[in-house]
Image (tube, rainbow, N blue to C red):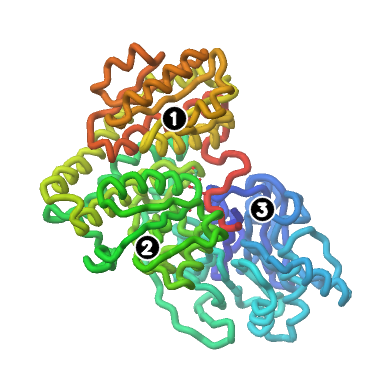
Amino acid sequence: MCGIVGYIGTKQAAPIILEGLAKLEYRGYDSAGMAVYDGQKIRIKKSVGRLKVLEELTHGGDLLPGYLGVGHTRWATHGAPTDANSHPHYNEKETIAVVHNGIIENYISLRTKLEGKGYTFVSATDTEVLAHLLDYYYKGNPLEAITKVMHRVEGSYALGVIFAEYPDRIYAVRKASPLIVGQSPEGCFIASDVPAILKYTRTVYFMENLEVACLKDDSLTFYSADEEEIKKESITVDWDAEAAEKGGYEHFMLKEMYEQPKVLEDTLKKCIRNRDICIEELAMTEEDFASIKKIHIVACGSSYHAGVTGKYVIENLARVPVEVDLASEFRYRNPILEEGALVIVISQSGETADSLAAMADMRDKNVKVLALVNVAGSGIARGADYVIYTWAGPEIAVATTKAYSTQLMALYLFAMKLGKIKGALKQQEFEEMLQDLLRLPGQVERLLANTGRIQRFANRYVAARSIFFIGRGIDYAISLEGSLKLKEISYIHSEAYAAGELKHGTISLIEEGTLVVCVCTQPALYQKTISNMVEVKARGAIVLAVTNEENREMEKEADYVIYIPKNNPNFANSLAIIPLQLFGYYVAVEKGCDVDKPRNLAKSVTVE
Ligand code: F6R
């Protein structure tokens, strides 16, 4: 997804912008550019390709001298990744430059109107419309031009805008795309995300929808879309800048996998007190919990997979019915939401466009929303009625691992708390489960300490064309995530199937030598899953089983077995996912794939 960085202050802007954009690389991008005011005019350099190309083009920023500038990494939506389509975009006189993250939905009609008024377009982007529209409305007052544009455009946008006639300021604007503003003694910053400016400041303002910020080197002013000045409180970000670096691991993904014991422990420590679950930030009373009659979990990708596990666990422990939906489906399916419904939106970034939109729709319908998010101050965290933070810290690798694990933990804690309040979990059972939870970080650590076997196995399947993951119940939820981890980073086709469903069609794809990963951790479903395993083996499949350490007889059925330590079956996902994450990772590394930045993917999917 696109990344924005801007700076105005006492230092040269271009090197700061390049540095900041590098910290946003995790978002995924295909081109990059910068606009810097050099004392006389706004100069733009931009190019398709990695940031390195822009660095070379500008000699590390030296060719764009000046104390005011905006930069951008683009993830193509409207128009192919080309130099012309890269940001920033100018008006024709080159007196206004714009960088944009988001999508302008009515850009075609605006473009037609502007062309009718004589404007010439040089790119296929929706963003260029903004540059010309600003020009059209600009009569000497930048704020007035910006707010007029805000009233005319539909869609989502985070913008950084500079005007050659006002070289003492940057304007920042936001609607439904993330944008933050930072302030330091050496100047002010805009950025799509905190890591971009962490080196310079920890004083950050999270912009709300339809707010405008005017940044000068020594002051910050915020306005509403009606040009009225508004007051905003800053937040002091306490993330460790080191935490955003690789710390000696070959890839961020590997580092983040190894951080899982710690982040699980952090999440637990924050929430368990006096043999009870007390989620500090969760402003839900016991009455609020007691009034929940039905839960709808809404999320995308891996967060959705965590939600599928959540369904099984909440229904098991709290006996409250749960539906799980992909946010992109939920927002358009007109769900039936009765009195007592709670919508849980799960999101690592807190900025996923579909999840945000689903949440906004629920808020409009007066349905209570609980957000499970990793990024404090993100759109979803701010927009929900209640929040539970997952304490994973910044996740840089595009493929989620530690954030997913903390989402599971947050769901377990929520399910147990709800189960206790609803009377479905007795105190003793509840306390035993707390002990089970407390054992999880150490058990994950043991699994991560012993990776040789899975690595050797992964090396053998690098050339596989297609790999299947099967399981029942919670094991099916684990399979969904195991399959996604493998395919998204290794580019090997993979599918997850409910084991009992395989024979209704998909089994025709199993042939001699097809690898089937069979997840078999649920005691109540053990024999049933073994039967499905036997079915695929009879058709020539090679089976890798992931099962509990007491199931030694599995070695008679499967070709390879990976054992996970004993714990409560409701929490099996947290353990079984570890070898599956490692499997995907080692296959991708052996294939030479760009593990941390897989092709076509973005870390934060802020467009629909
Ligand atoms: C896969 C992955 C994605 C995200 C999805 C939702 O490894 O990370 O599938 O889970 O894009 O993102 P968030 O959780 O930020 O809403």
Q: Are marks 1 and 2 in contact (CB under 8 Å)?
A: no
Q: Nearer the viewer, residue 561 or 187?
A: 561
Q: Which residue sits at x=47%, y=68%? A: 182
Kindly identify the residue that appears in the image at 25 percent across and 33 percent down. Answer: 443
* Residue designated by label 3: 32
**Amino acid type, label 1:** Gly
Q: Residue at x 58, y 48 (%)?
A: 28
Residue 250, x across and y down, in percent: 46, 33
- Marked residue nearer the N-terminal end (1 or 3): 3
Mark nearest the camera among 1 and 2 is: 1
Q: Quadrant of residue 507?
A: top right
In this picture, residue 554 sits left or right of residue 455: left
- Image quadrant containing the C terminus: bottom right
Residue marked by disc 2: 342
Q: Can you tell which of label 1 and label 3 is closer to the viewer? A: 1
* Residue that label 1 marks: 500
Beta carbon at label 2 within 8 Å of ligand 1 = no
Query: Which numbered disc flags the more N-terminal residue, 1 or 2?
Result: 2
Residue at disc 2, secondary structure: strand
Task: Answer whether labels 1 and 3 touch (C-beta < 8 Å).
Answer: no
Closer-to-camera residue (124/237):
124
The residue drawn where x is 41% and y is 25% is 518
Residue type, mark 2 in image: Leu
The local crowd at label 3, few if under 14, some if 14 to 19, many if 20 or more residues have their Cα within 10 Å, is many
